[in-house]
Image: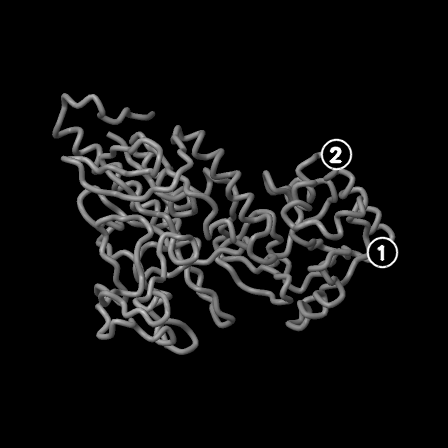
Amino acid sequence: MRVVVLGGGVAGTAAALAAAREGARVVLVDGGTGASTLSTGAIDATPWTPAATAVAPVSAAARALLDALGTHALPDAGARIATTAGVLRPARGHDVALLDLAPLARRRVGVVRCDRAEWDATALARAWSEGGDAFVPLDATVLRHVDERRLPAADFAARHDDPARLAWLAERLRDALATAGSRFDALVLPPSLGRERARATALSSLVGLPCGEAAGLPGGPSGLRFERARDRALAAAGVTTTFARASRVARHGERWRVALGEQPALDAGAVVLAAGGLVGGGLAYSPGDAAPAGVLPPASRVPFRLTIDAPAPLGAHGRPLDLPGSLFGIPPESLAWPFAHDPMMDRVGVLTHDEGRVAPGLYAAGEAVADAPRTWLVALEGGARAGAAAARDVTSTAERSPSSSARPASRP
């Protein structure tokens, strides 16, 4: 028997890789772009606030999965990231294309001028320097073609996947440093250093000092770098990827059956629900008054639902969702910030037990889980636990049925 993971984001990737490491045969069902692709590159274990200073521990299993991806660094003391919003922020870890400023405190950092709409080197240098650090604009030629002024950040970053183009950029930066006549300890650039892989390390080697990106807006190159690394890591682990949208998960004898629309259904010994939350598409807001005006809703219903039909109860604040007392549902302002403190919309998800277990052989991970912080590292940790537990379920079932031909193959 196999483990089927629903979702190709951080949680689903971690679950699939963890299950494969346990020796299970794994199929990952990728339903399309989700919240993980919106990552800006700064990653946290708890929702970030300006006052956040604690460095949360990260499990050995999660670190091993990050090593397999090769996309993010987790410095023991945390990281410090510059953002294109003009903020310097602490982070638990970062996309390796981003410049970590933690080792560069009170050093002179050049902010490379680049004629792009989202990048004002003078304003950013002034904003970043307000805390006492020395950020100085540096005149340099970064754009090689006229269209690069308006290219989306991800497309601009893709141009630096080409080693020849990266070498050209390095030469321009070395010329700029020589012309400036003053010493710089590092250079920060707009989100631009690779889409297939992070190119900051290679650029740093060519220039002769640390170079890296600032964290940009969601939907930039960082999320796409994760997707490319995910595909490489899954292929290396022997995980089969199917591109489809799961519609239903149900018991089928001693197994689980996953319906995939027009594609053949998948039978599994265990299933991990990691299709995301409200942003990723695993959950939907469906209030009782979502009907034509003037039509009385036929029944009261909870305001959220799973987009995959599965025997997984939804809840928040540690308890199942209550049916509203009105046919017209719950007032929307009671569900979300800033109208509610600790709002349900930030917490709603599948109620789980230890390791993300929903029922025997059924697990949930990532933003699909109730009450879990909606952060990159929590999704990674939860996916790793759920995937490993799902693989153990499959193994124990196979051991109880030694004649089964679907027994998972062992891996070295």
- Can you give x and y, in whole percent of width and height, for residue 283 in the image? 35, 56
Tag 1: residue type?
Answer: Ala
The foreground one among 66 and 313 is 313
- Please name the residue that numbered disc 2 is placed on: 164
In the figure, residue 271 lies in which quadrant?
top left
Residue drawn at the location 76% of the way across and 43% of the way down: 170
Marks 2 and 1, how far apart at CA: 25 Å
In the picture, measured across the screen, residue 12 lies left or right of residue 114, that is left
- Please name the residue that numbered disc 1 is placed on: 180
- Can you give x and y, in whole percent of width and height, for residue 200 in the image? 64, 45
Quarter of the figure that contains the C terminus: top left
Tag 2: residue type?
Answer: Ala
Q: Which label's residue is closer to the chain start, 2 or 1?
A: 2
Is disc 1 placed on a helix, strand or loop?
A: helix
In the figure, residue 241 lies in which quadrant?
top left
**Around disc 2, counting alpha carbons within 10 Å, would you say few (fewer than 14), some (14 to 19), or many (20 or more)?**
few
Query: In the displayed structure, would residue 87 be above or below residue 6?
Result: below
The foreground one among 95 and 407 is 407
Residue drawn at the location 55% of the way across and 56% of the way down: 218
